[in-house]
Image (cartoon, rainbow, N blue to C red):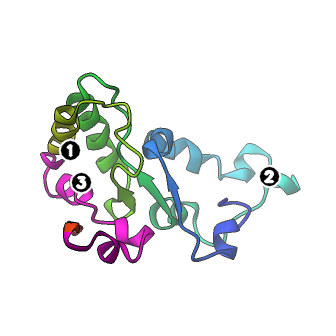
Amino acid sequence: MINCRLLDDLPSLKILFSHFAGGIGRYRGRICGFQAREQFGTAQLPRHNRRPRQPFEHYLDQRLYYDVAGWAGPDRAAEYGEHWVRFGLQELPLSQLVFATDYPQAVREPSQVAAYVEAVRGLGDSGRAVADGANAEKLIPDLKRRLGPRARVGKVPA
């Protein structure tokens, strides 16, 4: 998507990855490092030398979105989920994070779901913002209208 210029050709396309895109923050250095094609001897290979118009990090930080929920299973959801979200908040820009677009489906008990959300809110301003849907309207522009009086959309801290 990045190197083939799909995101350049479709500037309004929004892509959301679940589960922090498999922990992409942990692999970020490796992914960006492989963009040094001259160093790896692939610069002369047509299929390996495609490059986006912007620096690669631009797309990771400004074009792609990441759902931060979804790591914990049905037991100890708050503990494990908070741990996952805490590291994700350190590794990826808050402006690109959303919470629980498809989760917590594995957590069956309402009390565990509530504990998970409260644990994320306990991570400070960033945790509260993402748990309260701070960036959801970037993906669903009319979200407040759709939710009506139920709307509780947070704000990204300055």
Q: Position of residue 15 (x, y in %)?
A: 54, 61
In front of the other: 14 or 110: 110
Q: Secondary structure at mark 3?
A: helix
Question: Do the residues under discs 3 and 1 have CB atoms within 8 angstroms?
Answer: yes
Q: Which residue appears at 12% of the width and 45% of the height?
A: 122
Q: Amino acid at mark 3?
A: Ala
Residue, disc 1: 117
Quadrant of image for the C terminus: bottom left
Q: CA distance from mark 3 to mark 1?
A: 7 Å
Indicate left or right for 98 with 113 as reference. Answer: right
- Mark closest to the chain's N terminus, 3 or 2: 2
Residue, disc 3: 131
Q: Amino acid at mark 2?
A: His
Question: Do the residues under discs 2 and 1 have CB atoms within 8 angstroms?
Answer: no
Q: Is residue 141 above or below residue 110?
A: below
Magenta stretch, residue numbers:
120-149
- Mark closest to the chain's N terminus, 3 or 1: 1
Q: Which residue appears at 38% of the width and 77% of the height?
A: 142
Q: Amino acid at mark 1?
A: Val
In front of the other: 110 or 32: 110
